[in-house]
Image: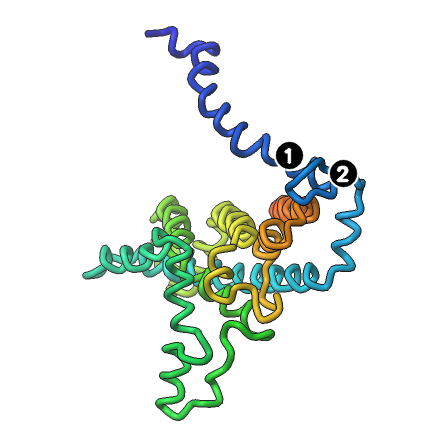
Amino acid sequence: MHWLSTKKAKAFMLLPTLLIYSIFIIIPVFIAVYYSFTEYSGLGRAEFTGISNYSRMFGDKLFLIALRNTLLVLVLSTIFLLVGSFLVALIMNVNFKGNAFFKMIIFAPYVIAPIIIGIIWGYILNPNYGMLNSLLRSIGLDVLAIEWIGGTKWSPLSLALVFTWQMLGFHATIFLSGIKTIPGEMYEACAIDGANGFQKAFFITIPMLKETIIINTVLIITGVFKIYELVYQMTGGGPAHQSELLTSYMYFTVFTSRRYGYGMSIAVMILTLSIIGSFAYIRIVARKQKREGDVQK
């Protein structure tokens, strides 16, 4: 069976996966890029218009609103998820009765379909009949019964919180895997020196999880740029598109307004921002690590 280890055999076994990936990922990207330079309504022939679709974005108030909301959700989700999932991972790393049940509860939202999550939280956060505002009013906290969703102010925060709830278990599991790789001798040495739990986490755990933090951050960035079902189910992009994210506005542009060319340019912009954000973060971290290494030398 030595022939299985040859380059030809490996290439042959990878061919089906590469073919499927190319058909459903690579080729559609190039098709989207092509149509982004055209004016196309879905019928007839596409008319080449150059970069007019891209220049139109910066004069489109709805696109700028969607971009602002997406960046807000990105910043809030990154903060909430990095801090929250790290703290949850520390708890998951402790042996206590019910630890397995705790892990299951934390991870459960990740395996629920996003459209179901949108329905659940839509009923909870609805400003008129939602459970949260009803509870706040029943205990006399009417001042806190705000427009969590469907308004022009708090929708990005609500989307970020729901996205955090959905993804918390996934990112905590990645952090937990990283924590498990840290040698126990390092904690024992710190304990001998009199370090407390906070000092162990701050001076050992966090520095040793730099690569894990990078992975989680990149996944958060790419994940936020794919949020659609939550917006569709919780706010529908309203009122008057004020709670749109880039993905939901792209969907509206393509399938409701039937401006395929402009919608594809938004899709290309989403892909570009996702790639730039991920690589920029990796580059910044790499430079910081290099400077720290030079200082230590």
| Residue 151 can be seen, yes or no | yes
Label 1 element class: helix
- Residue at horizontal 42 percent and vertical 68 percent from the top: 122
- Residue at horizontal 45 percent and vertical 14 percent from the top: 12
Query: Where 151 sits versus 77, above or below?
Result: below
Residue occupied by mark 1: 31
Quadrant location of the N terminus in the rendered image: top left
Judging from the image, the colouring scheme is rainbow
Q: Residues within 10 Å of mark 2 (few under 14, many from 20)?
A: few
Q: Earlier along the polypeptide chain: callout 2 or callout 1?
A: 1
- State the image coordinates of residue 249 (x, y, percent, origin top left): 61, 57
- State the image coordinates of residue 180 (x, y, percent, origin top left): 35, 47
Residue 47: which numbered mark, if any? 2
User: Which residue in the rendered view is the most extreme toward the bottom?
Assistant: 140
Lateral position of residue 236 relative to residue 52, left or right: left
- Residue at horizontal 46 percent and vertical 84 percent from the top: 145
**CA separation in Å, label 2 and label 1:** 14 Å
Front residue (pair 18, 266) = 266
Query: Where 165 sits versus 126, above or below?
Result: above
Lateral position of residue 62 relative to residue 177, left or right: right
Q: Disc 1 residue type?
A: Ile
Front residue (pair 209, 108) = 108
Q: Residues within 10 Å of mark 1 (few under 14, many from 20)?
A: few
Locate residue 68: give its quadrant: bottom right
Nearest to the eye among marks 2 and 1: give it: 2
- State the image coordinates of residue 131 (x, y, percent, origin top left): 36, 77
Query: Where 25 sits versus 248, above or below?
Result: above
